[in-house]
Image (cartoon, rainbow, N blue to C red):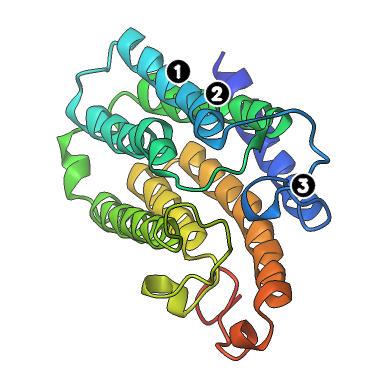
Amino acid sequence: MEHAYNLLLWGMIFLAVIVFVALYFVKAGYGIMRNGHWGPQIPNKWGWLLMEAPVFIVMGILWWKSERRFEPVCLIFFSLFQIHYLNRSFIYPFLLKGKSPMPLSIILMGVVFNVLNAVMQGGWIFYFSPSNMYSLQWLYTPQFIFGTFIFFMGMYINMHSDYIIRHLRKPGDTKHYLPRGGMFRYVSSANYFGEIVEWIGFAILTWSLAGTVFAIWTFANLVPRANAIYHRYEDMFGEEFVKEKRKRVIPFIY
């Protein structure tokens, strides 16, 4: 079983590289990049719920069935992971003001990844990590302290950026506006930057290959999309956007 788990981790790294390259050529058709080429669609609120809830549920099942479920450090890891997906699955979708639908094909791909990710993270935390690795002393290690700081910093940036995006429109307005404020001063996809930072923090605080795989996948998925959004903003807002000299997703770099 552990051998199969390790194969899954390395296989997901290999697949992330392919996805990273492919997404520079294929634009995922939801949100501002929505088009009619991805098949049947459903309302975005239910799309986000259906896509994100499985990871929350599967992670909960893996936690409950584990003999380590009440070990303090493992419980902290679990709680940090679930806090993010509690928001992403059950709060964030119902705060959305836009009404653009989500393609079922993208939702299904998201479900597959999210279930696999729950298996990767829950598998490591509760089943395959060395039994003596996450003692209470782990809470005093540089990895945990620094990683937790990075995790919450990324979460704040992500949620604050989502807040800015949600409040760009007044009720009934369907126009697109250029987000400003917060990390949008530096990048056009500040919400994606926050999420990348958040999961890098999780990889550091768990000091695990599983966490690193998730951070790699977050980068591979969101960086090409940030590039597509950057070019969409160039087309939509022209000189107004270009003169601000924002980067795409990594401040001062890309």
What SS does tag 2 mark?
A: helix
Q: Residue at x 50, y 40 (%)?
A: 209
Q: Is residue 185 left or right of residue 140?
A: right
N-term mark: 1 or 3: 3
Q: Please identify the residue farthest to the bottom as the structure is shown.
A: 243
Quarter location, residue 77: top left
Contact (Cβ within 8 Å) of mark 1 with mark 3: no
What SS does tag 1 mark?
A: helix
Q: Residue at x 28, y 11 (%)?
A: 67
The amino acid type found where label 3 is placed reads Asn
Mark 1 → mark 3, Cα distance in angstroms:
31 Å
| Image mark for residue 35 | 3
| Image mark for residue 184 | none
N-term mark: 2 or 3: 3
Q: Give the percent coordinates (x, y) of residue 83.
A: 30, 36
Mark 2 → mark 3, Cα distance in angstroms:
26 Å
Q: Residue at x 81, y 51 (%)?
A: 26
Q: Is residue 194 left or right of residue 111?
A: left
Q: Give the percent coordinates (x, y) of residue 69.
A: 26, 17
**Of the residues tagged 1 and 3, which is closer to the observer?**
3
What SS does tag 3 mark?
A: loop
Viewer-nearest residue: 222 or 197: 222
Q: Is residue 195 above or below residue 7?
A: below
The amino acid type found where label 2 is placed reads Val
Q: Residue at x 69, y 73 (%)?
A: 236
Residue for badge 2:
115
Contact (Cβ within 8 Å) of mark 2 with mark 1: yes
Q: Residues within 10 Å of mark 3 (few under 14, many from 20)?
A: some
Q: Is residue 18 above or below residue 43?
A: below
Residue for badge 1:
58
Does the image show residue 128? no
